[in-house]
Amino acid sequence: MIRWIAPTLTAMACALGAPSAAAQTAPLAPDVLARCAAQVQQLREDSARLTQKSAETDVRRNAINERSAALKAERDALKQDDLEGGLAVRQRLQDHHAQTLAFNAEVEKLKTEIRGVNVLKKEYDANCANRSYRRADLEALPETARNAMRVGLGGVQVPYIE
């Protein structure tokens, strides 16, 4: 019987409008609010840029894969006694391989940037999201920072690495 009292009291407190954990946290300090605004601005810029870059990378990856398949088909279609044709295809395959390696290096750089923006998003979520702040502190921020906090991250899609 005693075991059920605590959950019942908790449920009653919630039903009667006891303040939630989020409501009990202190408003953001002015320096933290400024940092949160900077994070919003950075996330808005980086996520749009990285999402675009990711889409472009997908298009390039598909083109590289198609080129790989075409070169392999060309190599497989060669007659064994066609030395000159074989050397030409081999050279194109080597050039394509070098381009693929360069592309893979770009993809790794993109992945690093995406990881960085995801870390920033997690920091924002942990320290800024759904937190209150004082109106005076908001008004003390530069206009771009105020606008960033007013808009927030609504509509922002942060790219993720699967």
Image (cartoon, rainbow, N blue to C red):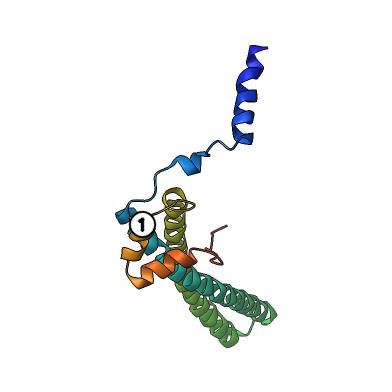
Image quarter of the C terminus = bottom right
Q: Quadrant of residue 43?
A: bottom left
Residue 43 visible here: no
Can you give x and y, in whole percent of width and height, for residue 103 in the image? 48, 72
In the image, taking residue 102 as reference, residue 10 lies left or right, namely: right
Can you give x and y, in whole percent of width and height, for residue 60 in the image? 56, 77
User: Dot 1, crowdedness within 10 Å: few (<14), some or many (≥20)?
Assistant: many
Q: Quadrant of residue 77?
A: bottom right
Residue 48 visible here: yes
Image quarter of the N terminus = top right
What residue sits right under mark 1 in the picture? 33
Can you give x and y, in whole percent of width and height, for residue 143 in the image? 36, 72
For the residue labelled by badge 1, is the local secondary structure a helix, a strand or a loop?
A: helix
In-front residue for pair 106/92: 106
Q: Is residue 82 above or below residue 20?
A: below
Q: Amino acid at mark 1?
A: Leu
In-front residue for pair 134/146: 134
Can you give x and y, in whole percent of width and height, for residue 4 in the image? 66, 18
Q: Residue furthest front?
A: 16
In the image, taking residue 70 as reference, residue 54 lies left or right, namely: left
Q: Is residue 157 above or below residue 123?
A: below
Number of numbered markers: 1
- Write the residue at 46% across / 65% down: 150
